[in-house]
Image: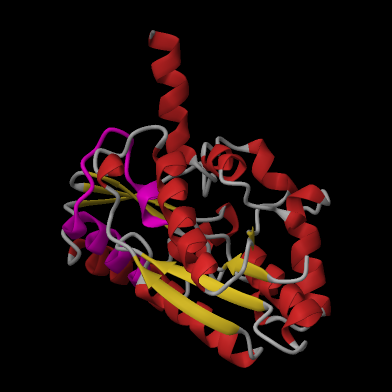
Amino acid sequence: MKRVVVAFSGGVDSSFLSFAAQEALGEKPGCNMVAITINTPYIPDWEIEEARLFAEKYHIAHEVILLPIPADITRNPPDRCYLCKKEIFKAIQNRARKIGIDTIIEGSNKDDLSDYRPGMRALKELNIASPLLQLGISKDAIRALSLEAGLRTWDKPAYACLLSRIPYHTEITATELERIAKAETALRELNIPGARVRSHGDIARIEVPIASFGDLLKTDLRTRLIEKIKTCGYLYVTLDLEGYQMGSLNRTLTLDNQHE
């Protein structure tokens, strides 16, 4: 690869990939490596800002593209990720063509094959390259390599877009996305890492790593958390006793298949 555009979300994987691409190509004459971040209503502002700061720190050419919610996903269909990825990467492709770069890469890794990821089909259809996946590199390996390189993202909690907090076949609105983002910001402000707020109408179902249960249930922290979550518009605040589960709402797809 001589010149690349990196799809850069600011997460562990795309940050490492952007850093590696910059090391390999960025110092050569000409614009050989550009990181592009997509800013949509279902990506919280802090994630965009962290991507910007990372690019600035490592002198990575960085652009942000604003996109609305694609019309095809407003009812949060089971293939939402596929439809969304198609729109996102088409936008990145259009920008890449304008700056004369043909190769687009993204940060999927070996572990992504173990979950329901319909978006992977979109990457294949659009000929998007996934170097970390192609090399069989796991998330743990990416974290280790990031630590070795001195990247602050090496221990950043895994993160997925806010659409993954909403049950399938539920209407997506800007108001609902803002409510979820505000609730998860409250968790961040209380220093509860790796948390998710799954939104079920009036109920906020909080998932945190099991190791965090003890701290979360301390009276003062629990009281403050309940107050903050309720100010976001929820009537009930619950803690999922199974702890954080990647893609936990995908279980409903299994149940639907069993009923068919």
* Residue at x 40% of width, y 51% of height: 87
* Residue at x 49% of width, y 55% of height: 89
Q: Which span is picked out in magenta?
A: 161-186
Would residue 200 appear left or right of 8 to someone viewing this image? left
Query: Is 179 part of what is drawn in magenta?
Result: yes
Instruction: Please identify the quadrant where the N terminus is shown.
Output: bottom right
Question: Which of the 4 quarters of the picture holds residue 80?
Answer: top left
Would residue 109 appear left or right of 209 to someone viewing this image? right
* Residue at x 41% of width, y 47% of height: 84
Residue 182 position, x and y percent, is 28, 68
Residue 90 position, x and y percent, is 46, 54
Residue 5 position, x and y percent, is 61, 68
Instruction: Name the magenta segment's main secondary structure.
Output: helix
Would residue 230 appear left or right of 118 to someone viewing this image? left
> Is residue 97 in view?
yes
Query: Is 67 part of what is drawn in magenta?
Result: no
